[in-house]
Each structure stands twice: as C-alpha cells, then as structure tokens.
Image: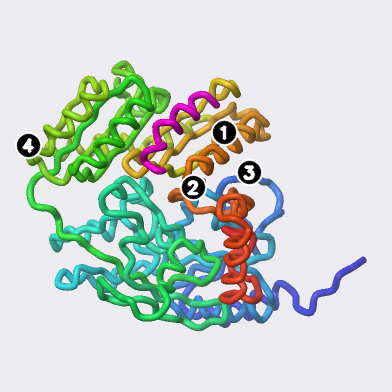
C-alpha cells in the first residue's frame, strides 16, 4: 500500500531553512552519512538523517524545534560528536542538530570563580583560557582535547581528575536550555550554593539530549594550586593488587588528583603504539598525581604503594615528563582499538569492590577465551574493560555478548553501576529496569513525557 505524506522532504527542508537564519542546513549525502553514523558501517541510507543543522544561535535551535514540532520529526542533539555509546547518531528521517559552532567563551570571572560558555566550547580550550587567569576547569575526560562542554554536560562526563574534583555534575552551576516546545529556560545561576526550587539544573546534567538542548553553561573554576604538581608511575603484580593499593590511598588523607590504572595487555598495546617499554616491568601500571610536591604527601603515597607490592615507582615534577605520562593515558583507546573490532565498557564500583571486580573480569576473559584490556579511573572505582576480536568478523561474537552480560550483572551485584561516565545512549538503555528498578524506570519515562510530550528529542536513547 502506498503511503502519502502531506509534505514532501523538499517542502520540509525549505521550511527548516526559513527558520535557521544564522546557522547552516546540510542535506547532501556525504554530510548526512558522516553525522549519522559514528559507530556502525553502512553503505545504504538506512538510518540516514533528513538534515544536519549547525546552529549558531539560540534562535536557530528554536527554529529547528519549531520545524520538528510542525512536521513531527525527531531531533538528535550533537555537540562535538564524540559519544561512545551511540548517543548522538542520526535516526532515519531525523534532524541532527549540532551546537559545535556555538563555541564562544562568554565570560571568565576570577572574582566569582566561574565561566560562562556556549556548549560547543572544547573542554581543553576552556581550561587553557582559565589558566591564563590563574584558574582552571577541573573536569578532565580522556577526550578533553576534542569534546565540548555541552556534550560533557549532556553525558555527565567524568575523567582523570574526578577522584579529587568530581565529575561534570559537580562543576555545573547553571544552564540555559531550549525545551521541546521552543522555550529557553534558565536554570541555576552564579552562586556556589542554591536551594530555591527543585534542582532542575542537575536533572539536565546527564540527560543526553532527551529533555532539551543546552545553549549555555555556567561552570565552576578553581584556582591553580600553589607549588609544583608531582606525578609518577608504579607497577604492581596485577590489577587486583593495584586496586587494593588504590582503596587504601583513597582513605589516607593524601587527596590525589589522579589514580589511573592500566593492565599489562593495555601497557603492551601502548608500548607498540608509543614506542615505549613499560610492559616489561610488571602486570599493571598505576599513574598517579598530586597537586603539589609536599614531601609528606609523596612519602605517604610511596609507603602505601610499597605495602601492596609496588615496584619501580618513579616520581617527577618535570612538566614535559608529566605531559608524556598524561599522553600515555589519553592514548590508551587508540592503542587498544588499533586494527581490531572492539567494545569498551564503563562500569563504576564502590571502592571496596574494585579489587573483586578486577578478579572477576580476568576470570571472564579466561572462561570465554577473550582478549580483554582493562584500564580506568581507579581512584573513583571506574573500570573500562575493552573486549576485542578480529576485524574480519563483522558480527559481534556471542562470547563477547555473554561476557558483557556477566560483567553487568556482577557490577550490579557488587553495588555498582553499568554506566559510570560514558552515559547510556542506545547501547545500554534496555538495562534501565535492571539497574534502577521498575518504579524508578517508570518515573524516568514520566519525566521524559513531561518535558517532551511529543517524544521528538533523541528518542530511543537513554531510557528507550
């Protein structure tokens, strides 16, 4: 049976272009494929968006929403498009709405310890600008050089400094958001404390574009600490021993800025990728950092690591050497992913359960005969196991699916979460009932219906 539409695609695009007066509307196949498919290979138009819009103003975003409501079209918000959970891929016939061109730092106020930015500002660029005034922006995801503040907020990104300074949610003071009905609302403000009304600011942090489109973010800035930071590495027999050391360091009063873990398989991949020679040391590497080189703090760190069998521990205050260590950690993913199919996961555990989880992941790899690389932000219990398989195998092996399910169930059994910082997207939204429970799952859908009654904002993501 032939289905007739009241409006042609050409008519819809014509109306859309009349509503987007500052930004750009793209409808060519090359652009649509590039912005519709982040993680899947396709040669046809299945799942292809109808239009890709680079907004340059709030009015552009409101125009897109006006068009979407008029023609009942889904809107997929994107920022820098670095999602790892298929959270911003286009859906068939949708509008992909990018805010990456809204990239101005509107204000840096040292007196108020805050910055006001548009969503497309790159995390690292904001940090650099703040440091020029003696401040810094603390959230430090591995994607810091490429990810935008808007995307960080939408996914509640974590990162390497979360152990001391918290995730994105702990550093957001206020937001401006365009709702599905086109209204722009202002949430939060410029104060470090705020108790008036319901905390809608935090409702939108981590909402993954399902409740509204972020147009402005007010974030906390911190003063650059006095003194030289100290950074170092230490090697342990295995990830379990490393996790035991980290658990004790976290309650020692040292307050590290970074406690990053890499297992031997990951170190070997990095050696190959970087031309280094770390893998010969031991079974697991801990990269650690503290904000200054106070001898008592560094000595306490070494004492606790030695207690758990650390070997070949070295520390440095040299900025170049520290930058090299940070680069080593940031290059983990391309090193592990190189030439292989892969799935990287993102569980977070209570600190007391991190060591048992490391043991469990190792056992799963052996039982299922899988290559699993394990790394993560050990200081806040965030584990990133990556399962790889040969590039020529186009379908995900059943053993990989089974291993992930086992790891997810074990995480929940130990009181953890199956999404620590990478958000939910499409890959995990069927686990909401399992992790949150039926009652909370239902409330999540009721909140979605309140803010987006037509269901046009990033459907099939986060809560399915």
CA distance for labels 4 and 1: 45 Å
Regarding residue 28, the answer to whether it shows in the image is no
- Among numbered discs 4 and 2, the one appearing first in the sequence: 4
Q: Is residue 39 above or below residue 398?
A: below
CA neighbours of label 4 inside 10 A, class few (<14), some (14 to 19), many (20+): few
Q: Is residue 322 above or below residue 63?
A: above
CB-based contact (under 8 Å), mark 4 and mark 1: no
CA distance for labels 4 and 3: 52 Å
CA distance for labels 1 and 2: 25 Å
Find disc 1 in the rendering and name its residue: 341
Q: Whole-percent x and y of residue 297? A: 12, 39
Say whether residue 50 is magenta: no
Which is in the foreground here, disc 1 or disc 2?
2
Q: Nearer the viewer, residue 423 or 298?
A: 298
- Among numbered discs 1 and 2, the one appearing first in the sequence: 1
CA neighbours of label 3 inside 10 A, class few (<14), some (14 to 19), many (20+): few
Which is in the foreground here, disc 2 or disc 3?
2
Q: Which mark is residue 295?
A: 4
Please state if 156 lies on the left or on the right of 166 as rendered: right
Find disc 3 in the rendering and name its residue: 41
Regarding residue 400, the answer to whether it shows in the image is yes
Q: Whole-percent x and y of residue 288? A: 24, 36
Which type of secondary structure does the marked residue at label 2 adopt?
loop
| Residue range of the region highlighted in magenta in the rendering | 350-364
Find disc 2 in the rendering and name its residue: 417
């Amino acid at each position: 049976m032939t289905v007739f539409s009241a409006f042609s695609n050409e008519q819809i695009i014509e109306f859309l272009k009349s509503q987007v007066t500052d930004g750009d509307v793209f409808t060519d196949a090359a652009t649509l494929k590039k912005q519709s498919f982040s993680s899947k290979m396709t040669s046809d138009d299945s799942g292809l968006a109808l239009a890709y819009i680079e907004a340059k103003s709030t009015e552009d975003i409101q125009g897109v929403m006006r068009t979407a409501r008029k023609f009942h079209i889904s809107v997929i918000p994107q920022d820098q498009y670095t999602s790892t959970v298929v959270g911003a891929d286009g859906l068939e016939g949708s509008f992909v709405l990018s805010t990456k061109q809204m990239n101005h730092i509107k204000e840096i106020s040292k007196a108020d310890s805050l910055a006001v930015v548009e969503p497309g500002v790159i995390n690292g660029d904001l940090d650099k600008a703040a440091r020029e005034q003696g401040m810094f922006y603390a959230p430090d995801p591995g994607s810091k050089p490429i990810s935008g503040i808007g995307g960080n907020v939408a996914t509640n990104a974590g990162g390497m400094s979360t152990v001391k300074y918290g995730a994105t949610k702990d550093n957001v003071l206020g937001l401006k958001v365009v709702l599905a009905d086109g209204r722009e609302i202002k949430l939060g403000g410029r104060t470090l404390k705020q108790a008036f009304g319901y905390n809608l600011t935090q409702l939108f942090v981590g909402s993954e574009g399902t409740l509204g489109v972020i147009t402005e973010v007010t974030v906390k800035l911190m003063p650059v600490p006095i003194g030289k930071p100290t950074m170092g590495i230490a090697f342990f027999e295995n990830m379990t021993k490393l996790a035991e050391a980290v658990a004790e360091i976290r309650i020692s009063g040292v307050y590290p800025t970074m406690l990053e873990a890499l297992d031997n398989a990951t170190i070997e991949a990095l050696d190959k990728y970087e031309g280094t020679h770390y893998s010969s040391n031991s079974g697991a590497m801990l990269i650690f950092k503290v904000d200054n080189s106070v001898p008592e703090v560094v000595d306490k760190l070494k004492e606790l690591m030695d207690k758990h069998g650390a070997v070949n521990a070295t520390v440095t205050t040299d900025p170049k050497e520290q930058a090299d260590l940070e680069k080593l950690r940031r290059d983990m993913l391309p090193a592990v992913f190189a030439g292989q199919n892969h799935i990287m996961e993102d569980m977070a555990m209570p600190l007391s359960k991190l060591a048992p989880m490391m043991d469990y992941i190792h056992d799963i790899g052996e039982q299922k005969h899988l290559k699993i690389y394990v790394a993560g932000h050990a200081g806040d219990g965030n584990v990133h196991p990556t399962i790889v398989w040969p590039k020529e195998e186009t379908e995900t092996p059943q053993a990989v699916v089974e291993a992930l399910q086992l790891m997810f169930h074990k995480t929940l059994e130990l009181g953890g979460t199956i999404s620590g910082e990478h958000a939910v997207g499409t890959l995990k939204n069927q686990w909401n009932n399992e992790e949150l429970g039926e009652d909370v799952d239902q409330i999540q859908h009721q909140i979605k219906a309140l803010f987006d009654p037509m269901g046009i904002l990033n459907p099939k993501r986060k809560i399915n």
